[in-house]
């Protein structure tokens, strides 16, 4: 393969205008928000025409097929020609709202899991309320 047929995934995401900065594209790839052919990859992964991308934005996954590679920044209109959005299943408004709530709860749970030590007075009252079913 030649250099013109392959490119780093983080650089391609920036050129295709998925992200405004290459650093943000690299972070997204590192955090598994972008997958190539269904696999988690590193930002240095070389992609080629025909590869499939899965990109997560705002708790929604979208599949794209790479149609082209450009070696330098191009206009937004030309950047849209570098990829094609695959058929996406329609997601109802309720489903998308539910996904947002679940993600918010997961973030809250992770934050609370980091807190150590015994519960304070307010937390003890809440625990006792559920433990002993007191409705006071």
Image (cartoon, rainbow, N blue to C red):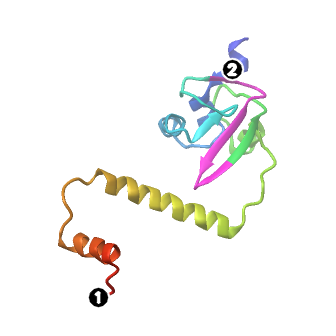
Instruction: Determine the secondary structure under disc 1.
Output: loop
Provide residue 5's location: percent of width, then percent of height: 73, 19
Marker count (numbered)? 2
Q: Quadrant of residue 13?
A: top right
Q: Residue at x 72, y 28 (%)?
A: 69
Give the overall secondary structure of the magenta segment: strand
Q: Nearer the viewer, mark 1 or mark 2?
A: 1
Provide residue 59's location: percent of width, then percent of height: 58, 55
Point out the residue furthest to the top here.
Answer: 1
Above-or-below relation of 4 to 79: above
Q: Quadrant of residue 66?
A: top right
Relative side of 128 to 44, left or right: left
Q: Is residue 59 magenta?
A: yes
Query: Which quadrant of the rendered structure holds the N terminus?
Result: top right
Q: Residue at x 72, y 66 (%)?
A: 92
In the image, the segment drawn in magenta is: 46-61
Instruction: Determine the secondary structure under disc 2.
Output: strand
Point out the residue furthest to the bottom here.
Answer: 136
Q: Is residue 57 magenta?
A: yes
Provide residue 12's location: percent of width, then percent of height: 63, 31
Q: Residue at x 68, y 14 (%)?
A: 3
Q: Which residue is mark 1?
A: 136
Mark 1 vs 2, N-terminal side: 2
Query: Which quadrant of the rendered structure holds the C terminus?
Result: bottom left
Relative side of 67 to 98, left or right: right
Which label belongs to residue 6?
2
């Amino acid at each position: 393969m030649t250099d013109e047929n392959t490119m780093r995934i983080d650089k391609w995401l920036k050129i295709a205008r998925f992200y405004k900065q290459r650093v943000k594209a690299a972070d997204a790839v590192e955090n598994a928000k972008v997958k190539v052919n269904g696999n988690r990859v590193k930002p240095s992964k070389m992609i080629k025409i025909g590869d499939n991308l899965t990109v997560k934005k705002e708790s929604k996954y979208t599949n794209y097929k790479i149609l082209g590679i450009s070696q330098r920044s191009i206009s937004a209109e030309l950047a849209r020609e570098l990829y094609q959005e695959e058929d996406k299943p329609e997601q109802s408004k309720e489903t998308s709202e539910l996904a947002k709530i679940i993600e918010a709860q997961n973030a809250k749970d992770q934050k609370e899991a980091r807190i150590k030590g015994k519960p304070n007075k307010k937390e003890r009252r809440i625990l006792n309320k559920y433990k002993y079913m007191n409705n006071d």
